[in-house]
Image (cartoon, grey):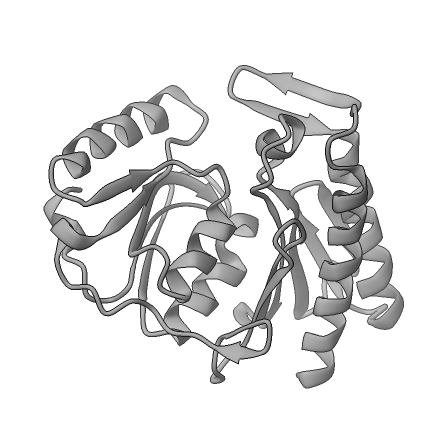
Amino acid sequence: MENDLALAVEAALAAGKLLRDNFGKSHVVDEALHHDLKLALDKESQDLITKILLSARPTDALYGEEGIAGNQDSGRQWIVDPIDGTVNFFYGIPHFCVSIALRVDDEVVLGVIHDPMVGETWTIEKGGVPLLNGEPVTCSTRTQLEEAILFVGCGKDTEAMTTGIERFKRASLRARKMRMMGSAALGMAYICCGRLDAYVESTISLWDIAAGKLLVEAAGGKVTLTLKPGKSDVYSIVTTNGKIPIEEIL
């Protein structure tokens, strides 16, 4: 697995360099929705990751936000978000990342989250210690909502946005600070190293949170996923440092 982790880091850093080199430039918009964007660079980033991963592991599968590749019958599946925070990237906000996880026989066994603008890389192997740029990290020790910083996502459809805004309002009355940051993967990375204390969102895709879930749990936190009815690999998520009573504002 060590070689798999090194390969995932290589792919994440290569994609991160691509994103950093293109940050602040004009971009081709492949799809513009009311609450989301798809860029040509999303696909270019995933294609680069796919080339690196599948050149080294040609019998593996890849499942990403921009589509699938490789042998879909394989028990080894790379789960990729080539730009988590595309809207931030497009608008010149330097808060986005590359997220890569490896699922073997339906169990996520490693994860990498790379922030190319800050130069931070979180890594984790199942059963191991979560690392930030090679140094061990843990979730915060905060136990009270009144001292916590919470990240609430609002999703992209009407139901998810309504739920998120209501939660944001309830939590704002209790928490020290609230954040809507635009990258689920980075939000979970921030929880695993103690910068944030909880993250809640009613609709999120697996590629956004696969690596982050493993990181948070290894750092002492708790992640609860509830599969959305009728949807594959789409969940509601509640993530905490393992100590904050988040149920009080859900």
Q: Is residue 12 above or below residue 179?
A: below
Rendered location of residue 4, percent (x, y): 71, 77
Q: Nearer the viewer, residue 149 or 204?
A: 149
Rendered location of residue 38, percent (x, y): 68, 28
Rendered location of residue 223, percent (x, y): 33, 61
| Number of numbered tags placed on the structure image | 0
Q: Quadrant of residue 41?
A: top right
Q: Nearer the viewer, residue 203 or 219?
A: 219
Left or right, 230 with reference to 26 = left
* Residue drawn at point x = 34 percent, y = 68 percent: 139
Q: Is residue 230 above or below residue 78?
A: above
Q: Is residue 52 above or below residue 84?
A: below
Left or right, 184 with reference to 84 = left
Q: Locate the C terminus and report the quarter of the image it occupies.
A: top left
Q: Locate the N terminus and report the quarter of the image it occupies.
A: bottom right
* Residue drawn at point x = 24 percent, y = 66 percent: 242
* Residue drawn at point x = 65 percent, y = 17 percent: 32
Q: Is residue 241 above or below residue 5?
A: above
Q: Is residue 229 visible?
A: no
Q: Quadrant of residue 101?
A: bottom right
* Residue drawn at point x = 53 percent, y = 48 percent: 208
Q: Is residue 21 visible?
A: yes
